[in-house]
Image: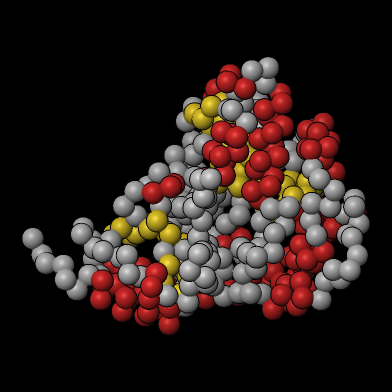
Amino acid sequence: MNPRIHGGPDALGVPQFDFSTNSNACGPCPGALAAVQQADATRYPDASYTELRTQLAQFHGVAPERVVLAGSASEFIFRITAWVAQQGQYAADTTVCLPPHSYGDYGQAAQAWGLRLTKQADTAQLLWACEPSSPLGDAHSAWPRWPVEVPLVLDRAYEPLRLSGAPSLSDAQLAQVWQLWTPNKALGLTGVRAAYALAPLGAQDTVTALELLAPSWPVGAHGVAMLQTWVQPEVQAWLAQSLLTLRDWKPRQIKLLQSLGWRCLASEANFFCARPPAGADLSGLRDAGIKLRDTTSFGLPGYFRLGVLPPDAQEALRVAIKKATSSLRPY
């Protein structure tokens, strides 16, 4: 079995200072956490999620029929890929376009269905975009020609954690694409698995097909509680305040790494990629309670993705890196 590479807890347990995830380091959001803890797990949710769909639709200003609930972003990734595979007469002729650097589940879902991967947006039958992107946290650039004739899924997991810049697409263009939302990152509750997608205008037949491909109750009681809380004004106010804190922490963390000889790439989100000095041996960081996210699996070898963490975590990182690189000698 080929294990998937992710940030967060691993075989060694929960890192004391976890830079490897993109979860909001100001979290968990108190209101959302309380709602999840108080969720009634003794009963099934409404199988149609009527109230939840209505709340999410009102939050985004769309019709409830455009809301597709999912067990997680990854679950939706595999489900819509399965639907695309069903449309092709021959799987080998169906191609999926990925960004140059992207979340591994896009490609794994395609390969699980025997679909070919491509970088050519204008010839694919399924397009993936992520903005702010992961691992780089920058804007997506390989947009196809408009209007889009095939499903384009825009992963907006990090839009609520945007610290600078602005979305590339206009409201009219956003109405033509699938928008995938995973609020658990912004709320600091990544252990709660729940997500939703907003379908493009005129895609009701596809929505129906995706509903048929879903299991019953894809979102449990705790996920429902989180998503319902997500749309509340007080939770959005907490999120806005947390972004101010992250904007203060981020340049401090970048400056710290640069002072240690790291090259930091520009980013618009609550994370960024950085490359250590040549020859640095960072293998001991995990044993020191620090975890970074190696970006080789993203197609970006030599770099690490680091979520922005509080100053005490940054100081622990500085001490650990200093120790790991103390034996380096200038050329």
The total number of labels drawn is 0
With respect to residue 315, does 307 lie above or below? above
Q: Position of residue 144 (x, y in %)?
A: 55, 30
Residue most extreme to the front = 1
For the point 82% across and 40% down, the residue is: 211
Q: Position of residue 13 (x, y in %)?
A: 52, 70
Q: Is 240 left, or right, of 282 in this rendering?
A: right
Tell me where residue 154 sits by quadrant: top right
Instruction: Let me know if residue 95 appears in the view.
Output: yes
With respect to residue 30, does 262 lie above or below? above
For the point 52% across and 76% down, the residue is: 245
Q: Is 4 left, or right, of 236 in this rendering?
A: left
With respect to residue 203, does 281 lie above or below? below
For the point 49% across and 36% down, the residue is: 142
With respect to residue 57, does 169 lie above or below? above
Query: Quadrant of the image for the C terminus?
Result: bottom left
Residue most extreme to the bottom = 312
